Image: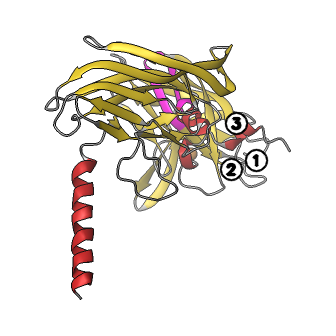
Amino acid sequence: MTTFHTKAAMAALCTLALTATAHAHATLQQREAKAGASYRGVLRVPHGCDGTATLKVRLTIPEGLYSVKPMPKAGWELSTTKGAYAKTYQDHGTPVSQGVKEITWSGKLPDDNYDEFIFVGTVAPDLADGTKLYFPAVQECERGTANWTDIPKGSERVSAAAPMVRVAAMAMAQTEAKSEFTVGPIKVVTPWTRATPKGAPVGGGYLTITNTGIEADRLVGGTFPGAGKVEVHEMSMDNGMMRMRQLPKGLEIAPGATVELKPGGYHLMFTGLTAPIAEGKPLTGTLVFEKAGTLNLQWAVSPIGASAAPAGGGMGGGHEGHQHH
Ligand SMILES: [Cu+2]
C-alpha cells in the first residue's frame, strides 16, 4: 500500500511538473502551415536555463521547409548552417536543392525577459495533410542548456518537445482560395449547386454575396453550363405555402451588405437544362451584376438533394484530379 501511494503521489507530482513546464517551453507561435505556401516562424523563448541568461538560440530546420531565411535581430549575431535537401524543390520556378538547415542567434536574453526569433521559409507542396514538422531548438545559457528537442513517436508524451507545426495539404489550401470570387466591389463566397436527376429541367445555385462598395448593385443573371437561363428567384411563405417567384429586376445588394442565397430563400435558378448537373467536378459559370459587370466563378457540385455545399468548401478532388469518364 505504501509503495502504491508513493507511486501515485510521484505520478501526480510528475504531471504537475509537466503542466508547469509546458507553459515555459520554447514554442512556435503559428502551429499551422499550408503545403506549398510560405511559413513565417516565430520562436518564442520565455526564459533562460536555471535562472541564467540565454546566450545562444539554435534552431534546426526540418526537411520539408525550404528557402529558409532568418530575420536579423538587433543586438544579436546571426549565423546559419547550410546543407543539401533530401530532394529538389521549386522556388518560383527555380530548382533549389540546398539551403539553411540550422539558424543560430547569439546575444543575451536575461532569464526574466521574453523574446522572439523569426524566420521565413516555404513549405514543400507535396506534404500530406497533417504532416508534423519538428523544429528542435536549443538554448545555450550562461549556465547549462535547455533542449527543446524531443520528437514524440506517435501519441507518446515527451517532456521537452521540439516546437512543431502541422501542415494542411495543398488541395485544401487551394480549395479555400478557389471558393472566393470577386469583380469590382462584389465578393462571392462558396458558390455551390447540387447534382440533378436525369431529365430534371432546372437546378438551383447558392452562394453568399458581399458588396464592399459604396453604392448598391443588383445581381441580375448569369450563365451556367448547359442551362438556357440563369434567373434570380425568391422562396417565401405565402399563406402557409412555400412559393417560388422570379425577381424580374434581380436582387439588390446594398453597399456594405452581405446577402446569402440558400435553399428555402433567395437562390439562382438554372432553367432549361440540356443535361443533368453531375456531382463532383466544379462547373465554370458567370454571374452578371448591373454595375460591377460579369463575375467568373466556379460552382462546387453537391450530391442530389444535398442541403449544403460539399465539405471543405467544395472545389474538391475533381478540380485537381481531372476525373474524366
Ligand atoms: Cu427557383
Q: Amino acid at mark 3?
A: His
Disc with the residue nearer the chain's start (2 vs 3): 2
Q: Please indicate whether residue 121 sits to the left or right of residue 215 in the image.
A: right
Q: Residue at x 43, y 22 (%)?
A: 103
State yes or no: Cβ of the residue under disc 3 lies below 8 Å from any atom of ligand 1. no
Dividing the picture into quadrants, the one containing residue 97 is top right
* Residue that mark 3 sits on: 319
Main SS, magenta region, reads strand
Q: Which mark is residue 13?
A: none
Q: What's the image's color scheme?
A: secondary structure
Are the residues tagged 2 and 1 within 8 Å (C-beta)? yes
Q: Amino acid at mark 1?
A: Pro
Mark closer to the observer (2, 3): 3
Give coordinates of residue 129: x percent, y percent. 57, 44
Q: Amino acid at mark 2?
A: Ala
Disc with the residue nearer the chain's start (2 vs 1): 2
Determine the secondary structure under disc 2.
loop
* Residue that mark 1 sits on: 276
Specify the segment rendered in magenta.
Answer: 177-190
* Residue that mark 2 sits on: 195
Q: Is residue 105 shown above or below 24?
A: above
Give coordinates of residue 3: x percent, y percent. 25, 82
Give coordinates of residue 15: x percent, y percent. 26, 63
How many other residues sit within 10 Å of disc 3, few (<14), some (14-19) or many (≥20)? some
